[in-house]
Image (cartoon, rainbow, N blue to C red):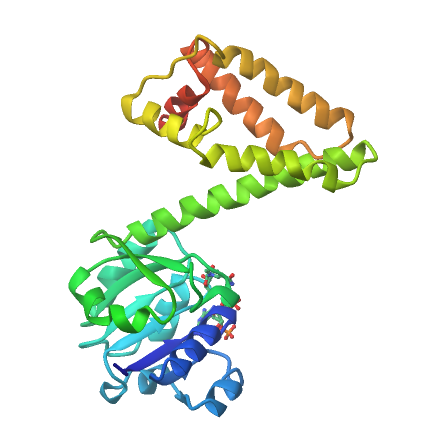
């Protein structure tokens, strides 16, 4: 079924989303704060609105997809626009509290807000495997689910509008911290005069093992410990690992490398040890994370 979609924001993401909607056969209206970014989309059949008010006129249909740098940009762009009857789907990054504020802001202007965290860069939009965390009013999402599926799979998390970003930021934190650890490890290999490729197979085994079901499958093991709030440490207690983390810091120090991330981990491990978790397992660190 074809429909009309308005896309607000023509950065790398918004432009690809508009193009994807066009290729899926939808009618598309676009608007961007800085003019001059819609040429290729207009050539594909999009209508470029001269203002946000025109882009969100009643004639433009119900569905408005927003992709901007943050939610402040939506407040700036749509401050003077009547949102009566509109369903805004904001796929920009921000914090859960900002999304909850935005849901009230949109509702006060007569519209409904669906929040989303899209889990793919531009080349993955519309490709198999791409998915988006959505939260907010489920009936409004259901009404537009078929259209939104042009961008990615639709993964609904719940009615609280903050949830989309809670899940999105959690994923990004794992992604960035995991890859940053690999950067530190690679720099360590280089410091010994070895090419990074010598480290790669061991990194692949470590990261792959964490997500697996075997004895190194620590994501599943720790998830069960976190829910039970029990952290067995007989075979590898936290105190031993806090001392070991100091050795990691010394290793980076000896290699003349940056210490910011290793020191942050060392301090977290030491605090959990001091807070009485030394005889428990590594997973007990979550108790110190829960109580900063
Ligand atoms: P870009 O930097 O390419 O584009 C940013 C967009 O925001 C531009 O359209 C810009 O308009 C607009 N904008 C910024 N400030 C304002 C403002 N005050 N008022 C109106 N418009 C404003 O970013 P991306 O397209 O890459 O990312 C968009 C969102 O998607 C971000 O929140 C990002 O975190 C998220 N995201 C990005 C991914 C990626 O790989 N790129 C992956 C997943 C999510 P103008 O042209 O006028 O400057």
Q: Position of residue 203 (x, y in %)?
A: 62, 36
The residue located at (74%, 37%) in the rendering is 198
81, above or below 172, in the image? below
Q: Nearer the viewer, residue 151 or 173?
A: 151
The residue located at (55%, 23%) in the rendering is 267
Residue 274 falls left or right of residue 220: right
The residue located at (52%, 37%) in the rendering is 208
The residue located at (54%, 16%) in the rendering is 241
Quadrant including the C terminus:
top left
Q: Position of residue 93 (x, y in %)?
A: 42, 58
The image quadrant of residue 283 is: top left
Q: Let me know if residue 79 appears in the view.
A: no
Q: Position of residue 28 (x, y in %)?
A: 36, 84
Q: List the single residue furthest toward the left.
A: 139
Quadrant including the N terminus:
bottom left
Residue 140 falls left or right of residue 193: left
Q: List the single residue furthest toward the right.
A: 193
Q: Position of residue 95 (x, y in %)?
A: 38, 51
Residue 255 falls left or right of residue 208: right
Q: Nearer the viewer, residue 85 or 248?
A: 248
Q: Let me know if residue 288 appears in the view.
A: yes
Total residue callouts? 0
44, above or below 113, in the image? below
């Amino acid at each position: 079924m074809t429909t009309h979609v308005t896309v607000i924001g023509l950065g790398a993401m918004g432009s690809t989303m508009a193009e994807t909607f066009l290729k899926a056969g939808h009618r598309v209206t676009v608007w961007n704060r800085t003019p001059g970014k819609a040429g290729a989309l207009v050539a594909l059949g999009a209508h470029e609105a001269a203002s946000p008010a025109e882009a969100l006129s009643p004639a433009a249909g119900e569905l408005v997809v927003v992709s901007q740098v943050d939610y402040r940009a939506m407040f700036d762009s749509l401050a003077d626009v009547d949102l009566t009857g509109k369903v805004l789907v904001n796929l920009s990054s921000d914090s859960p509290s900002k999304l909850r504020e935005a849901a009230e802001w949109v509702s006060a202007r007569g519209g409904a807000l669906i929040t989303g965290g899209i889990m793919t860069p531009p080349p993955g939009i519309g490709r198999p495997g791409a998915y988006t965390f959505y939260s907010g009013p489920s009936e409004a999402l259901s009404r537009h689910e078929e259209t939104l599926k042009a961008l990615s799979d639709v993964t609904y998390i719940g009615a609280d509008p903050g949830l989309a970003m809670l899940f999105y930021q959690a994923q990004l934190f794992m992604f960035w911290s995991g890859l940053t650890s690999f950067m530190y490890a690679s720099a360590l290999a280089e410091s010994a005069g070895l090419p990074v490729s010598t480290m790669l197979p061991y990194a692949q085994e470590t990261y792959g093992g964490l997500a697996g079901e075997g004895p190194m499958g620590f994501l599943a093991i720790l998830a069960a410990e976190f829910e039970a709030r029990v952290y067995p440490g007989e075979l590898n207690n936290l105190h031993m690992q806090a001392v070991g983390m100091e050795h990691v810091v010394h290793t980076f120090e000896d290699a003349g490398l940056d210490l910011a991330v290793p020191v942050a981990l060392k301090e977290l491990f030491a605090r959990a040890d001091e807070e009485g978790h030394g005889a428990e397992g590594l997973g007990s660190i979550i108790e110190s994370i829960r109580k900063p």
